[in-house]
Amino acid sequence: MDDELRTVVTRVHSGEEAAFDDLYHLTVRQLYKTLYTYLMTREDVEDVVQEAYLKLYQVRRKLDDTRSVPVYLRMIAINCARRKFRRSHPITAPVEEEDDVSGTETMKGVVREALQKLSPADRLVMGLFYGDQTSIQDICRMTGEKEGTVKSRLSRARERLREVIDHGT
Amino acid sequence: MEHNDREYTDMLNNELKDIEPGAGLHSKVRDGIAQNIVHMRRRNTVLGAVVIAVVLTMGLSAVTPVFGRNGTLPQVITAMAAERQAKKISKTLGTAPVQQTGAALQTSVTTVQTVSDSALSQPDGVLALIISNKSGTSVADVLKLRATGLGWGRIMAQLNVSGRDIGKAMSQVKAAAATKGKGENSKPAVSNTDGTKIVVNGEITGVSDTLITVAAKTFVIKSTTQLKYQGKAITPADIATKLAAGKLYATVQGTKQVDTSILANVIIVQDTAEQATPSNEQTNPSNEQAAVSNDQQARGKVTVVTATVLHVDGFANDIILNANTKVEQVGAGSTNIAAIKVGQTVQVHVVLSGVTYTAQQVHIEDAYVKTDTTANEDQTTNSAVTTWQGTIAAIFPLNNSITVTTDANSLLVFRITATSVLQDASHKALLFATLTVGQKVTIMGRTLTDNSVEVVKLTTTTSTSVNPGKGKGKH
């Protein structure tokens, strides 16, 4: 994956138009999930994804193949998402309808409810750390927050999630 | 912190398991990028066109007045810089910047008044004065150009005034203002030019037909006193009227009389306080010592001339004429004060003493034109004219005089002046240089106090028969 990504970034850097599509396909899934933990609606995530890839396209010639492009892409996307969040000022993101009520899906509903009770910033850190397996240092780079803050957010998110799952409140 | 808490990872992955980008997202991203490419191309095209237009306009504007009455781009830039400087200096000067600029540039009171009376703002007025001063053009002409809507840059280019000239003038004005600032706490200008003459500059606090009080000094007004306001004669009654309407200032040059009163020789009335002459006031506030002299040259058209006062356009102060003032005119050589006429262009060597500008020498650049009517007028209006007949005994070109042995056998000195008419028997005009020793002449003239005679009209009755180079006197 890393080698493949590096090759694609090199091709993008050299100006190959098709390489950008390959870069999209390699990175979009993870980015989509990360953004979803933050924004919690598909419409908002898709808007941000479009904006993030457009920005990446505009700077594609400046991309350094040794640089961590996924980190850079997520930084762009997080900034776009934050701007979108500020513009819309949502108090709570709308909960998407769930039709399936099986055991696993019941759990999913609880987790989603727990996530929604977290602050967006805490959710983002949770998604990056547990969903993306991103290191604390990279989270600090992406969010611009200090390590202590990121750790506090993670701790708070875990606690809240645990509480909701265990007690249902 | 490690990722060993599998429970949360699994929980989150399970939650996000179905969260996948839709199939249409990629095409949306591609469409967004494609639209952006088109947008960027259009933007670049427009920007390119704008840049080309700007470059072309700039290139064209450097040589063509594309800015209409504001002129070319360099002229517009020059105007902007000049206006900025004028605004700055106006702000620095504070009150009456036009007047202060006029004083610093030694512009006449009339010129300053012309600017003040115009509709120009103070910074524009300052600029108009400076351009007028630097170009040698009358301020009225500058105002006319401005009134046609021309920008300052174009006016400057037309009158051959550079931005550097403006900068220098601004510095001059600023320096003058700084000097004035230092002297502002001093008393009104009062100075002695010699033991008997005194010049006072300050507010008029009282005036009657025979007395005027300026800066707490009272001067006697007599029929010989010259009273002037904006280059024109004014009466004490007029001054009183103006004084009743508001503050009035004056510069008075007077002479101490035996009875300790001071006779006003010249009173120049102004609406605003004259800038104090720094040299005397700061170094010699007691005003008891002689003023420091300062030679200057003034050149311009004569706007006012009397027996004792000369006013030259472009020179702020009135110039005192006295018996020591030498006058010469092109085509006439040495002449007298009477030869100075309004409208003539003169170059005056002025000596500043205290606040009095005294003419040492006046050079009339307009060529002397002799007219018969001059002599005729003199004949009819002056009863002291006497007629002599005799023979030219000697000629003194250096002082324009001749000696004539009269028929009564007396030797008289006749002085030829600028107004003297020289003619031959057939009334044809003669030049002084053509007179020769031995010529028979009929002279009409006035006897002066030194018993010499000022020639009104000299008529040669015979042509010369003696080589002037060999003439030794009597024929």
Image: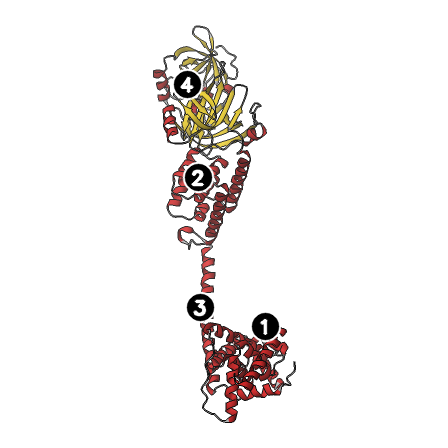
In this rendering, the answer to whether B198 lies above or below A106 is: above
Q: CA distance from mark 3 to mark 2?
A: 47 Å
Q: CA distance from mark 2 to mark 4?
A: 38 Å
Nearest to the eye among marks 1 and 4: give it. 1
Any part of residue B451 in sight = yes
Task: Name the colouring of the figure.
Answer: secondary structure
- The subunit letter for the residue under badge 3 reads B
In this rendering, the answer to whether A47 lies above or below B428 is: below
Mark nearer the N terminus (4 vs 3): 3
- Residue at image x 51%, y 86%? A110
Q: CA distance from mark 2 to mark 1?
A: 68 Å
Nearest to the eye among marks 3 and 1: give it. 1
Residue A144 — which label? Answer: 1
In this rendering, the answer to whether A40 lies above or below B159 is: below
The residue labelled by disc 3 is: B46
Residue B137 — which label? Answer: 2
Q: CA distance from mark 4 to mark 3?
A: 81 Å
| Location of residue B330 in the rendering, given as x and y in whole percent from the top left corner | 46, 27
The residue labelled by disc 4 is: B222
